[in-house]
Image: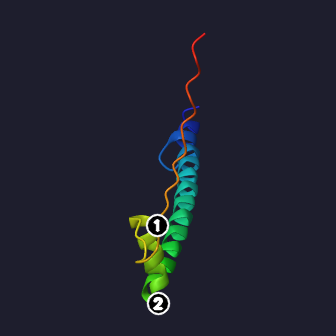
Amino acid sequence: MLLQYPLWFGNGGVYALWTLRREIAAQREENAELRERNQALAADVVDLKQGLAAIEERARIELGMIKQGETFYQIVEREPAAAAPR
């Protein structure tokens, strides 16, 4: 029994190997997500460098800007009326 303990729970044992494999899998998943995010950001950079269309789109979406001569309409939905007490 004493000889089996280091094999299962000691430094470099089966439990440590299992834990390390879990951590590696989690890190690979995080790396894949970050890689996708970096690719999207790189595409945004290319768009912003190449033309004004991407800059205009960002100004409209993020800053709410409109072109001169355009009319801006904002539609606000009403909240449903409160139910009458019985």
Color style of the picture: rainbow
Residue 86 in the image, given as x and y percentages of width and height: 61, 9
In this figure, which residue is indicated by the disc labeled 2? 50
Q: Which amino acid lies under the numbered mark 2 shown in the image of this protein?
A: Gln
Above or below 30: residue 1: above
Residue under the image location 51 percent in, 79 percent down: 43
Sequence-wise first label, 2 or 1: 2
Q: Which amino acid lies under the numbered mark 1 shown in the image of this protein?
A: Ile
Residue 76 in the image, given as x and y percentages of width and height: 51, 49
Mark 1 is surrounded, within 10 Å at the Cα level, by few (under 14), some (14 to 19) or many (20 or more) other residues, namely few
Above or below 81: residue 9: below
Left-right relation of 1 to 49: right
Quarter residue 3 falls in: top right
Residue under the image location 57 percent in, 41 percent down: 8
Q: Nearer the viewer, residue 7 or 32?
A: 32
Gap in Å between the C-alphas at discs 2 and 1? 19 Å
Assign a secondary structure to mark 2. Answer: helix
Query: Which dot marks residue 13?
Result: none
Residue 27 in the image, given as x and y percentages of width and height: 52, 58
In this figure, which residue is indicated by the disc labeled 1? 61
Residue under the image location 42 percent in, 65 percent down: 62
Q: Nearer the viewer, residue 64 or 8?
A: 64
Residue under the image location 44 percent in, 78 percent down: 56
Assign a secondary structure to mark 1. Answer: helix
